[in-house]
Image (spheres, rainbow, N blue to C red):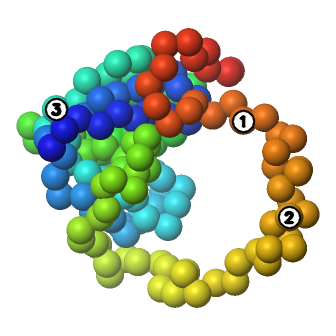
Amino acid sequence: MTSLSGGCQCGAVRFRAGGLKRPSICHCRMCQKAFAAPFGALVVAEKVEWTRGAPKHFRSSEKVRRGFCGECGTPLTYEYLEAEYIDLAICAFDDPAAIPPETQLAEEQRIPWCEGLETLSVRTPEQKAKYAPIMAANRSFQHPDHDTTDWKPRS
Ligand SMILES: [Zn+2]
């Protein structure tokens, strides 16, 4: 697999990763908490190069630490300390759609409302039209989803 780029929301930490395998979503309570999300989406990366900055870490258990951007807090890694590889957060990649999960872990801890999310109501075209100018008027400070040399993270 070719290497793919990614990074945190503010752009202080950027990476390129190769040897990607075993993309998964994990429903365990620690991933829920670390991602502050219904589940964590992670992919094993045999080769990771930090091309800008580096993650800070929280030791979430005896054998695991989790990396995140120290500036903006974006979760970035799951690192089993005895492994030769680390896991990267799929949604931190510039193109998360390129890494579809292939399996679920800790399904016994899945939050019940995860089932059927795709059936929830969505905004009508009229509601979208109403909010579009409001959204357009709010300039984003999120790093663009590609490598760039002229980016200054906001603090
Ligand atoms: Zn950041």
Amino acid carrying mark 1 in the image:
Ser
Q: Which of pointers 3 and 1 lies earlier in the amino acid sequence?
A: 3
Element type at mark 3:
strand
Q: Is residue 48 visible?
A: yes
Residue located beneath label 3 in the image: 47
Q: Which of pointers 2 and 1 lies earlier in the amino acid sequence?
A: 2
How would you rate the neighbour count of disc 2 (Cα within 10 Å): few for under 14, some for 14-19, many for 20 or more?
few
What residue is drawn where x is 35% and y is 33%?
5
76 versus 44 height, above or below: above
Residue located beneath label 2 in the image: 129
- Picture mark count: 3
Residue 117, image quadrant: bottom right
Q: Nearer the viewer, residue 21 or 63?
A: 21
Q: CA distance from mark 2 to mark 3?
A: 44 Å
Of badges 2 and 1, the one in the foreground is 2
Of badges 2 and 3, the one in the foreground is 2
Q: Tell whether circle 2 marks a residue whose Cβ is less than 8 angstroms from ligand 1.
A: no
Amino acid carrying mark 2 in the image:
Ala
Residue located beneath label 1 in the image: 140
Q: Position of residue 147 (x, y in %)?
A: 44, 25
How would you rate the neighbour count of disc 3 (Cα within 10 Å): few for under 14, some for 14-19, many for 20 or more?
some
Of badges 3 and 1, the one in the foreground is 1
